[in-house]
């Protein structure tokens, strides 16, 4: 009977996105590109690398991202909503910025530019409804 249950299961890694995140006003108020970016960045999480996630066009191009401008706006929106935080600044040449997901504890690395106490775990819960309602009521230009 045990084999029957596991035979039809989809294998591989998965992304656990808590209802606490999905139901908070900060997530509900996100634009479509920002929510998509959050999923694409969260997909990089392997259980031990929160704080070392990449949000560059070259890293996300295989996931369908083509515009650096859209990527930049979505990243800034996620940082403003406190769902993602920069843990290391980018530097030229060839040093990408690192990000962490704010509903998970930080997996600290001495190469990060922030201290573990500066990481905003669950700060997205403090985002007010008024700010998100303003975002939700935005009108599209046709």
Image (cartoon, helix red, strand yellow):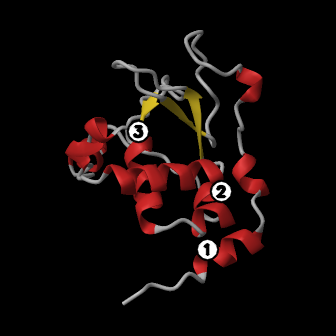
Q: Which percent across, then down, holds residue 94?
A: 34, 19
Q: Is residue 116 above or below residue 29?
A: above
For the point 24% across and 42% down, which residue is it? Answer: 3
The mark found on residue 28 in the picture is none
Question: What label sits on residue 55 in the rendered view?
Answer: 3
Cα separation, mark 1 vs mark 3, equals 23 Å
Assess disc 3: are there few (<14), some (14-19) or many (≥20) residues with their C-alpha within 10 Å of its C-alpha: many
Distance between the alpha carbons at the discs numbered 2 and 3:
23 Å
Q: Which residue is mark 2?
A: 20
Badge 1 marks a residue whose secondary structure is: helix
Is residue 99 left or right of 105 when viewed as pictured? left
Task: Judge the density around disc 1: few (<14), some (14-19), many (≥20) Cα neighbours within 10 Å.
Answer: some
Residue tagged 1: 135
The residue lying toward the viewer, choosing from 1 and 65, is 65
Q: Residue furthest bottom?
A: 142
Query: From where the camera sits, is residue 12 visible?
Result: no
């Amino acid at each position: 009977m045990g084999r029957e249950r596991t035979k039809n299961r989809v294998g591989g890694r998965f992304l656990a996105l808590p209802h606490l995140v999905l139901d908070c006003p900060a997530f509900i108020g996100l634009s479509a590109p920002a929510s998509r970016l959050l999923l694409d960045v969260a997909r990089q999480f392997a259980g031990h690398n929160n704080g070392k996630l990449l949000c560059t066009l070259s890293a996300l191009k295989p996931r369908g991202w083509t515009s650096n401008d859209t990527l930049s706006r979505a990243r800034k929106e996620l940082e403003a909503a406190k769902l993602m935080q920069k843990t290391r600044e980018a530097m030229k040449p060839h040093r990408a910025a690192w990000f962490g997901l704010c509903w998970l504890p930080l997996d600290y690395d001495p190469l990060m530019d922030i201290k573990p106490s500066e990481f905003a775990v669950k700060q997205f819960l403090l985002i007010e409804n008024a700010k998100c309602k303003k975002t939700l009521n935005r009108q599209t230009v046709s």
